[in-house]
Amino acid sequence: MPAPVLIVPACNGTQWIPVASIIRVEARSNYSKLYFSSGNCLVVAKVLRWFEQRLPAAQFIRLHRTHLVNKDFISRYVNGTGGRIVLQDGLQLDVSKRRKQQFLKNWYGLAA
């Protein structure tokens, strides 16, 4: 079975992106910046909600209004009011207080 891909309209045409290569998607106003395991980035004119609706919910977790993260790249969770995650590359991202319970359910594999 072929790996799932995300078809993204970009300024230089349509790009087919393997879903497993996406580390995180960061909201930037009416744009989103995708970060890949290869170290590359891509900025597209789509809001974060667009990605949230198209990426597998079992694999991607919304942390707060600016980040959607591939749970395969999360190395640990640090407890706190909302908490914070640490990605495999050492980057730390906050989890909103409002999304903490849903994040923990999804990360521990309890969400469908």
Image (cartoon, rainbow, N blue to C red):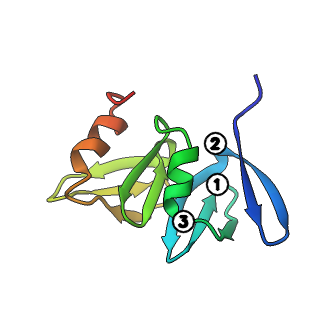
Amino acid under label 2? Ala
> Residue 5's quadrant in the figure?
top right
Is the residue marked by circle 2 packed among few (<14), some (14-19), or many (20+) residues within 10 Å? some
Label 1 to label 3: alpha-carbon separation: 21 Å
The answer to which of marks 2 and 1 sits earlier in the sequence is 2
Q: Residue at x 47, y 52 (%)?
A: 69
Q: Nearer the viewer, mark 2 or mark 1?
A: 2
Q: What residue sits right under mark 1 in the picture?
A: 37
Do the CB atoms of the residues marked 2 and 3 lie less than 8 Å apart? no
Checking the image for residue 59, the label placed there is: none
> Residue 14's quadrant in the figure?
bottom right
Q: What residue sits right under mark 2 in the picture?
A: 20
Q: What residue sits right under mark 3 in the picture?
A: 47
Q: Residue at x 44, y 61 (%)?
A: 67
**Quarter placement of the C terminus:** top left
Amino acid under label 1? Ser
Q: Is residue 9 left or right of residue 92?
A: right
